[in-house]
Image (cartoon, grey):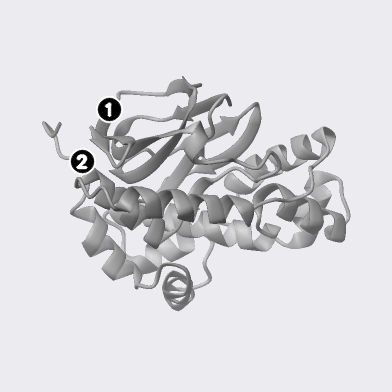
């Protein structure tokens, strides 16, 4: 449907096993993940990995007009909102980092308002996206370094349940610790330690929504030292306890027959 000059669609997608898809359009496409059970999602933009892991409700992906986006996921059902924005309404700086798995409750709220038919949210959303992209400009990462960081992201994802130090990650990437921190931050907007914490929280969110495990069991399965450590990280990053997250989002799962 058309809302405030933007095209908005609420979509449910179901896959039985591993699947891949691409997006390449002459408009910007903003995707808000709302609910679902994909246990693994990898995304690339123009051949560069931009995210991998367990998508969390409220996260967003932006596919700029004229760019090539590819995604792979494992089986499950998801519900998301897709917003198409004409390229002339939103300039995208050429050196802006990709918005991928991006978490912003205010921006997600505007996307939901659009899906509810509130035309006034369109201008606010575009202004917020423009400000976010302008703040995400960073020096280019050399292709060889980018490939090392891509590989390191896979290395990290396979080891979230164990301790990972900056020295471990630097050795895996073949860099000094200082070089890794600089290049990793340029590529992702996060330090390696911040990225590891983010990925552990994302996996914990998935377990809370999809597995009948206790919070303590999830803490140890996702690399946190204790129940209290996980709770502190949750409150700091998501503004709620793991139990509150589970109650809020487990009920939002995509039901059989829905859609």
Q: Which residue is mark 2?
A: 254
- Nearest to the observer: residue 23 or residue 238: 23
Q: Are marks 2 and 1 in contact (CB under 8 Å)?
A: yes
In the depicted structure, whether residue 49 falls above or below residue 108: above
- Nearest to the observer: residue 56 or residue 221: 56
Residue 210 in sight in this render: no
Query: Which residue shows up at 47% across the image and 74% down it?
Result: 236
Q: Is residue 169 left or right of residue 131?
A: right
In the depicted structure, whether residue 245 falls above or below residue 77: below
Q: Which residue is mark 1?
A: 14
Which of pointers 2 and 1 lies earlier in the amino acid sequence? 1
Determine the secondary structure under disc 1.
strand
Query: Which residue shows up at 44% across the image and 65% down it?
Result: 219
Q: Is residue 150 left or right of residue 44?
A: right
Q: Position of residue 91 (x, y in %)?
A: 57, 40
Q: Residues within 10 Å of mark 2 (few under 14, many from 20)?
A: many
């Amino acid at each position: 449907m058309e809302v405030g000059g933007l095209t908005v669609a609420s979509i449910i997608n179901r896959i039985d096993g591993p699947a891949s898809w691409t997006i390449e359009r002459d408009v910007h496409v903003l995707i808000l993940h709302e609910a679902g059970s994909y246990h693994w999602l990898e995304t690339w933009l123009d051949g560069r990995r931009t995210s991998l892991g367990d998508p969390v409700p409220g996260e967003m992906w932006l596919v700029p007009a004229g760019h090539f986006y590819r995604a792979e996921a494992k089986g499950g059902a998801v519900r998301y909102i897709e917003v198409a924005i004409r390229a002339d309404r939103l300039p995208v700086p050429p050196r802006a980092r990709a918005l991928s798995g991006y978490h912003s409750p205010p921006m997600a709220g505007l996307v939901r308002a659009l899906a509810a038919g509130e035309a006034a949210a369109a201008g606010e959303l575009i202004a917020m996206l423009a400000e976010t992209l302008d703040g995400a400009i960073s020096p280019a990462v050399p292709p060889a370094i980018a490939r090392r960081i891509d590989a390191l992201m896979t290395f990290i994802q396979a080891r979230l349940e164990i301790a990972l130090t900056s020295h471990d990650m630097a050795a895996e990437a073949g860099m000094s610790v200082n070089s890794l921190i600089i290049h990793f931050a340029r590529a992702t907007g996060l330090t390696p330690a911040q990225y590891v914490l983010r990925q552990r929280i994302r996996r914990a969110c998935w377990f809370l929504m999809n597995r009948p495990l206790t919070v303590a069991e999830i803490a140890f399965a996702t690399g946190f030292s204790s129940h209290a450590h996980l709770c502190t990280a949750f409150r700091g990053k998501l503004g709620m306890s793991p139990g509150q997250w589970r109650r809020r989002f487990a009920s939002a799962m995509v039901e059989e027959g829905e859609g």
